[in-house]
Image (spheres, rainbow, N blue to C red):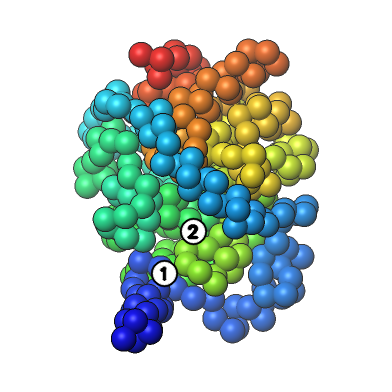
Amino acid sequence: MTLTILLIVLAAIVFYTNFHPVFGGKISKKQKNEFENLPNYRNGRFINQIETPMDMNLVDGIKILRELNRNKKEREPQKSLPVMKLDSTAIARREKNRVTWFGHSTFLVELDEKIILIDPMFSLRASPLRIFGPKRYTMEFPIALEKLPEIDIVLISHDHYDHLDRKSLCKLKDKTRRFIVPLGVENHLLKWGVDPAKITSLNWWDSTMAADIGFIAAPARHFSGRKTGDRFQTLWCSWVIQGQTHQIYYSGDSAYGPHFRQIFEKFGKFDLALLECGQYNVKWRSVHMLPEETVQAALDLQTQIFMPIHWAGFTLSVHSWTEPAERVTAEAKKLNAVITTPLIGQSLDLNENIFPRENWWEK
């Protein structure tokens, strides 16, 4: 009887992961054959520029699970985070050159009278399940997704749940003119009903123009996958965004590596770099930066100013929720790197050089 129940449960899991649309689409055999000619694809999977071990053993995993059940009060805020509101009519006028953080890694970029959404994630949980998985600290946003005007470009860094959210994409697909994604990620969008004519997929160092803005897919040191067995099947990347007078860098998720210096050598200095800093652990520093490495990445890029991201949204590691901000601001001060730490919804004005530096998390 027990064996029968176990088999039924396993069959249900297999059926769910293979047919539920939340997991997205699959890479076709034709795509795999085309990918084999790429320098960053080998033996049926995408690879990083340098060796990236991901061999955390079972004992390490159990230790981290135990830590996740301790000191829960420190790992997430005990009251709602402050959120500044955006005016939908002001966005619709398209007069600003500004960047607004929605928490974690979601951004609204207004540039050259165009509207760009980066890694739009508006759901309650960073998980394929509605009732389990990391829960968002607050469901309050600077502006509701439904109130956003027409979006010119949605930009995706990779297919993990805290960056590629099916529910958000389904709401955006009819009000977005173009989607720009790493290779293979287009399969997920197609599965969710996005018009294929709207999708552009790029490999590292490939570029495209959209709404008179340049987008370059640059390397990152990370991985991909939405379910067991599909890790490394789609590409992950960072992005260079080139406007008429401003150049912005978005790291996506990435460990520290030589790509930051390479990106500077190819594209020069940046006005603003949005750099991963949060949900890290020494056990997986080959795929996520520690805060001190985030500062070094900013120095490698020679950016005018940088902003730590990938925090204040979800608890995905065992550090306290404020630790990323505390460590990165201390290191930036030590190395004379210029940092901005806006509230959620507090805009960075690229024209007026308005870059907030308040340690708001201490309050």
Residue at point 61% right, 43% down? 288
Q: Quadrant of the N terminus?
A: bottom left
Residue named by callout 2: 159
In the displayed structure, 34 sits above or below 332; it is: below
Asked if disc 2 and disc 1 are in contact, CB closer than 8 Å, the reply is yes
- For badge 1, the amino acid type reads Gly
How many numbered circles does the render carry?
2
In the displayed structure, 175 sits above or below 37; it is: above
Residue at point 46% right, 25% down? 322
Residue at far front of view: 1
Residue 281, picture quadrant: top right
Label number found at residue 253: none
Camera-nearest residue between 243 and 170 = 170
Residue named by callout 1: 24
**Badge 2 density bin: few <14, some 14–19, many ≥20, Cα 10 Å:** many
**Badge 1 density bin: few <14, some 14–19, many ≥20, Cα 10 Å:** many
Could you say whether the residue bearing mark 1 is in a helix, strand or loop? loop
Decide if residue 324 is on the left or right side of residue 291.
Answer: left
Residue at point 67% right, 81% down? 33
x, y percentage for residue 350? 49, 24
In the displayed structure, 90 sits above or below 171; it is: above
